[in-house]
Amino acid sequence: MRKTILLFVFVATTAISFGQTKEKELTQAEQFSSQAGTLIERQFIDIGKVKGVEIKILKYKDLNAGTGKSALRFEFEYKSSYSTDTKIASLDADEIDGLIKSIKNLQTNVFPTTRDIYTEVTFKSRTGFEAGAYYSPDKSIWTTYIQIEKFDRNSMVFLSTEDFASLLSLIEQAKGKM
């Protein structure tokens, strides 16, 4: 009887832990905006668009305390045959320099090279936004991409090297306006 109870507890605990989904990680700016007891103003400033991905600055301001935070926001509308879904990622202001440096490093030091084996080079933010490239020896080319949401293949957008350069330019513009 005791073994049966222990087995039931083990199975129930395992089922519960596998059944739970992870909550989306929040940026520092999103955490700032979700504080209870505050009056928050949100401003969405359009920067530009590349390959269907809208780049915006999102400014949060606590109107009671007079404090604020900003984030870089990426929005992509994924369309399937049955519905549409908007994929959204935000990067805190302190992550933008790392993204810019990574894109420039890819352009300068990675894209001019070749590899003998399949290779991936990626930048990841705290919340799972990803920008990078992979090299396929079969095609002998680097393929660039961004993935808006972590673990969501439908949020992946493939970019040409020209699109990747445009993305960098938009991110630099956004940084200047934050």
Image: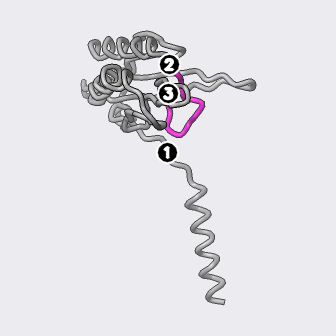
Q: Secondary structure at mark 2?
A: strand
Q: Quadrant of residue 43?
A: top left
- Colouring chosen for the image of the structure: one colour
Q: Earlier in the sequence, mark 1 or mark 2?
A: 1
Q: Amino acid at mark 2?
A: Leu
Q: What number is the disc on residue 88?
A: 3
Residue 151 covered by magenta stretch:
yes
The residue at the point 37 percent across, 18 percent down is 57
Q: What number is the disc on residue 159?
A: 2
| Residue 26, position as x, y percentages in the image | 40, 38
Magenta span: 147-159
The residue at the point 69 percent across, 25 percent down is 80
Q: Earlier in the sequence, mark 3 or mark 2?
A: 3
Q: Earlier in the sequence, mark 1 or mark 3?
A: 1
| Residue 140, position as x, y percentages in the image | 50, 25
**Relative to 120, residue 2 above or below:** below
The residue at the point 28 percent across, 25 percent down is 101
Q: Secondary structure at mark 3?
A: strand
Q: Secondary structure at mark 1?
A: loop
Identify residue for label 1. 23
The residue at the point 26 percent across, 13 percent down is 176
Q: Amino acid at mark 3?
A: Ile
* Cα distance between the residues tagged 3 and 2: 17 Å
Q: Is residue 100 left or right of residue 54?
A: left
* Cα distance between the residues tagged 1 and 2: 28 Å
Q: Amino acid at mark 1?
A: Glu
Specify the farthest residue to the front.
Answer: 116
